[in-house]
Image: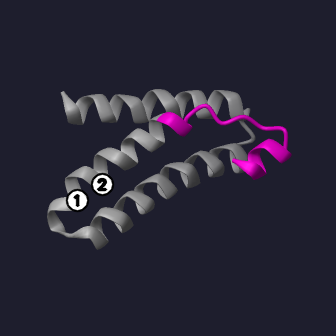
Amino acid sequence: MTYVGIAAGIDLSVGSVFALGVLVSAFMSQYGSLWAIVVPLVCCAAAGLLQGVVIGYLRLPPFIVTLAGLTGVRGVVYYITN
């Protein structure tokens, strides 16, 4: 978030990606604490990397990309939790 703020960008998907990380961590905790730490970090990093690639290579505005990420990730969380 520091780099995003310095670059005068915006990231709207932080809360939804955090919720995804918490959800994945809760599910993975049944397999041990290592999995409950590593797998959510990988999932959240993948979500951020995907958004960063779209912003960087496709030159789309960060507001639009992170708004779409917010909606998509929140939809996944809602689907998983019913």
Q: Position of residue 34 (x, y in %)?
A: 30, 73
Residue 3 among those drawn in magenta:
yes
Classify residue 41 by image quadrant: bottom left
User: Outermost residue, left direction?
Assistant: 30
Residue 30 horizontal side relative to residue 58, left or right? left
Residue 59 lies in what quarter of the image? top right
Type of amino acid under label 1: Met
Q: Is 56 placed above or below 42 here? A: above
What x and y, as percent, mark residue 39? 34, 63
| Residue nearer the viewer, 13 or 52 | 13
Q: Image height check: is 18 above or below 16? A: below
Name the residue at 75% across, 45% down: 4
Q: Quadrant of the C terminus?
A: top left
Residue on which disc 2 sits: 25
Q: Say the numbered circle drawn on residue 1.
A: none
In the displayed orientation, state which residue is furthest to the front: 33
| In contact (CB < 8 Å): disc 1 and disc 2 | yes
Q: Nearer the viewer, residue 25 or 75?
A: 25
Distance from Cα at disc 1 to Cα at disc 2: 5 Å
Q: Position of residue 42 (x, y in %)?
A: 43, 62
In the image, the segment drawn in magenta is: 1-15
The amino acid type of the residue labelled 2 equals Ser
Which label is found at residue 28? 1
